[in-house]
Amino acid sequence: MMSGSEADLAARLEVRGITKRFPGVLANDRVDFTVAPGEIHALLGENGAGKSTLVKIIYGVLHPDEGSLHWNGEEVHVADPHSARALGVGMVFQHFSLFEAMTVLENVALGMDQPGDMATLAGRVREVSQAYGLPLDPERDVFTLSVGERQRIEIVRCLLQNPKLLIMDEPTSVLTPQEVERLFETLRKLASEGVSILYISHKLDEIKQLCGRATILRGGKVVGACDPKAETAKSMAQMMIGAELKTVTRRSGGALGKTRLEVEGLSLASEEVHGTDLKNISFAVKAGEILGIAGVAGNGQNELLTALSGERLAGQDSAVRIDGTVVGRRDAGARRRLGLCSVPEERNGHAAVPGMSLVENAILSGHHRMELVSSLFIRAAAAGRFAAEVVKAFDVRTPGTGAAAGSLSGGNLQKFVVGREILQNPKVLVVSQPTWGVDAGAAATIHQALADLATEGVAVLVVSQDLDELLAITDRLAVINVGVLSPAMVTREASVEEIGLLMGGVHGLDSSPAEEEAAHVA
Amino acid sequence: MSLKIEARPETPRSLLYATPLLAVALTVVSGFFIFLAMGYDPFLALYHFFISPLLSLYGWSELMVKAAPLIMIGVGLAVGFRANVWNIGAEGQLTIGAIAGGVVALAFWGDETWLTLPLMCVAGILGGMAYAAVPAFLKTRFGVNEILTSLMLTYVATLFLSTLVYGPLKDPLGFNFPQSRMFGDAALLPMILEGTRMHLGTVIALAIAVAGWVLMTFTIVGFQVRVLGQAPAAARFAGFSASRIVWFTLLLGGGLAGLAGTFEVAGPIGQLIPVISPGYGFTAIIVAFLGRLHPLGIILSGLLMALSYIGGEVAQVEVGLPQAVTGVFQGLLLFFLLASDFLVRYRIRRRAPAIQAARSAQAAEV
Amino acid sequence: MSLEVVALIILTVISAATPLLFAALGELVTEKSGVLNLGVEGMMILGAVAAFAVAVTTGSSSLGVLVGALAGMAMAFVFGVLTLTLAANQVATGLALTIFGLGLSSLIGAGFVGIPVPALPKLAIPGVSDLPIIGPLIFGHDVLVYLSLAAVAGVAWFLKKSRRGMILRAVGESDISAHSIGYNVIAVRYGAVLFGGAMAGLGGAFLSLSYTPLWNEGMTAGRGWIALALVVFSSWRPWRLLAGAYLFGGVTIAQLYSQGAGGFGIPAQVMSMLPYLATILVLTIIAAGPWKGRLNAPACLGKPFRPST
């Protein structure tokens, strides 16, 4: 894939001694690496390793505190994304830089510095999207598109500007396995045309498949470089994590108890303007069991979670049962009192109030089950004890329970909110993305705590986009796609291909915007 | 050396309470230059504006009389603002409260009993609540923005009051002036300081502020209000009903404004007239912010804003300053306060020069 | 009713609607960029008093109009510094702007109460303007009326067709996305806020120089707030805004005429409540209706943004 020997050519991009500080965090610490022309170079690291910060610096969104960037051997100052694009750098963001209420064409034009007139641009969008197998209809509004289609907008927008370096920030976290395969084909084609690709990911298999070289970041520092094809996934993981991997221990084959959480025919229209409606969802979780729900982001996971927690009420009382009690029309407080605790995906502003102390955040969801309120008055001492207990049991790093939730790092806050629910002795625990953004050690602690809960007879439901996580800790697994939940399968017997197809769903790749587009052109 | 602005991970309390003082200081300094530009002796004008009202017992009693409605309304509004409920129609709720209390007083006219005054207060509270219930209903039922509805209702309330005093409630022996009969003695608030206009309502206003502090700090209701304001999704997650909180804050704000209106007509005014309040309902918005939405802080900011009214009057008499200066001062104060908030939320740090930092990095490597 | 009377009514409706149209159109652009400026009333009344004071002092109403717009803009600049540069709460800052504007305007206007003002120039096309009915109806207005209509067309074109308009919408739709692909969110918003201020100032100038050519304390009488409601009513669409402004102009005039006609036995004050009650009614219908007017609201409306660098 690399043309010529590396030493002959000036590196297309060289990063020298880049350092970037944020309040309380050293995001990048004297980072050095190079990317050659036509190379697919992986930037590998865990969540929080500093990958996104680094590529935002290369693209001019952020400015480094120290260090320099060199382009084809010359030092460059990338003041903003316009100058990055002028050099020939294109970027596909992890959280897309798209405008939902605007059309594909407008979105493309906004990402270009010389878009020309709109009619010509529309033609070029069609050309490029056809040439690279990225079907797109320029006239569609973005909010009507799937996540995969949205990513195509970002890629096409870059390609229209003939980039020399394409940065892809975690591009596959929102794609089905089949979509990933298609993306890789496109990237290989681009590389063969001489485009350098900087590929950011924490998924080891993908990097082995796609990349010629990898630079590994940990805690903001470069901790190694390797040829991914010569390494095993495990050896790269150890470089990335810097410790031996722990495995979750479960008392396997434990007898399951009675059904604790039962959902039957749950349909609910999304409140969000561009959200996903839940369609006739049914499943049951027994005491002692962990059920996983896999799926690509934005397929109704958040809607399902709020319908289970009681933040939104179902149409019928019988849609949700806790230990046999119908609760479909009862609010979150009532469900908590019956024993259903939940952890939503978003920590800041949903699971926790960033401006409030940990004690107040303990009251937030703890006051129903932990007797923290008596006749309208808050029992401050009891709340303080509960918060301290969570901090201790889950090793939350904080100066004290009086610290604001927003001042904690993402991983520590995650430990706090998960711990807060687990320590309430729930009968049913519904948790979304339990280890999002926490380091490997903390992830292992949380996984172990979930396993222990199940062993104690709690029914646990884990919603996650991390398939590896679900395969590791769940007993059964179902897949959600456009608001429809597949029947659950036994995790041990499930194949990744099968799950991948379900994640793509009936509305997957071949609902072909290409055909619609053809119709449009005709 | 360059400067770098970054968000503070946590709000320092000291700054939170120090910045209102900074805002007041900046307002006084601007006042100095405004007076200078208008051709007044700035020292003399500032003296009459801010100092001379405080040199007599009468001045202090007037300060309390003007601060009472500001504090009562400010506390009610602050609870709403904490929940992100923007009731800016307190002026209208005050007016309706005054009308309701006044109608009771006039209904008992000539036959007042000990019950008259308590009934007036209840009517005032209910009137203010009913008026605030309109935006509450429209917001919770249809999602109509309460800012615009509560404000529009203020204009309606003022017109309604004028309809009444020019029409059905006009004093039959009042030479056709647009005003009601004077209320009977039993329909007036008892005075607590001989020779001044300081009435029972001033003490009640202070008690309300303390009660507001207890509500917001120690009860689950106050907690719900704060959570809803800071993170609505978290409030839902915790099982707090947003629409109940919206209703609660609007009814509380409306009720307190209504009571303040009744106190005005049963206290310093003693009858219904076309204009009952010199904009207390709007000034109370500034009072709430200046007091950092904290009921005890609102006592202090209420006194300060009362001073801006009295100072305006004194300065008008003594140095011929136009009364409108009061409004300018109030607006300026709020501007400075909002600007100084930046210091509370962000900090400015020096960034070491790049070269030096690179050198020290090299040194570290060697 | 004779044709002349109808023409006269239409004329007054247009002139009652024009200040609303100016102010609301400016606010529409401001809101499209994601900024909610509740200080329209304050900017408008400062524009009114500034325009009036300059027109009286210099004898030039055109200069007055210009200064009115600049005064609105100056107020908007203060708003911009607070909300955009210092990331202050937009609702509170808008309220502060209104309180300050009302205070400052009565301070400035104290010496101008009861003084007459030179008239605004009318569009006078020889021959055509003298035609009966059609003449005054189409060609007989102040220059500002035509300017307001041209502004509607201009804003509609700008938002829909121009690249700058597209960027402005993008900034209002997602400030984070716009920032990450390299647009200066704060600069775009400053532009929109200043335009909003200038338009509110023009609305105020029209009010004090043409609609009621006299200065009165608090003479905007809530028109700035009604303009805010009109933006919601229009679902952020300029042509619908035009319709809304003329509808409200009609309500205002209907109230004046019925008072003139003896008010059908209804006290004048009750009739004066009409525009305010109509505003509440319209807001409720828009919010409660089956149409999804809110779909068109800029997604970042009212949210503060500070870029990290």
Image (spheres, grey):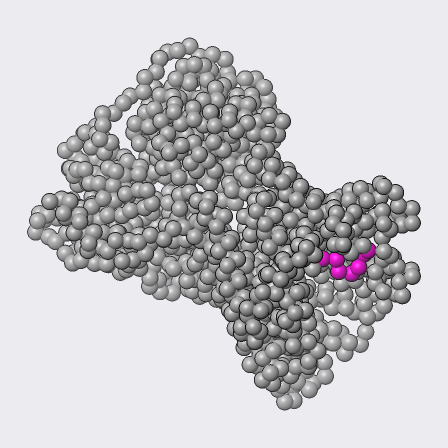
Q: In this view, does C226 lie above or below B236?
A: below
Left or right: residue A256 versus residue C225 is left
Looking at the picture, tell me which residue is in the foreground, A201 or B140. B140
Write the residue at 35% across / 65% down. Answer: A116
**Image coords of residue A402 (percent x, y):** 44, 34
- The quarter of the picture where residue A508 lies is top left
Residue range of the region highlighted in magenta in the rendering: B271-277
**Image coords of residue A338 (percent x, y):** 56, 21
Split into 4 quadrants, where in the image is the N terminus of chain B?
bottom left
Looking at the picture, tell me which residue is in the foreground, A178 or C18. C18
Left or right: residue A331 versus residue B201 is left
**Image coords of residue B285 (percent x, y):** 61, 53
The secondary structure that dominates the magenta segment is: loop
Q: In this view, does A322 lie above or below B222?
A: above
Q: Can residue C232 be seen in this view?
A: no
- Is residue A374 within the magenta segment? no
Write the residue at 12% across / 53% down. Answer: A10
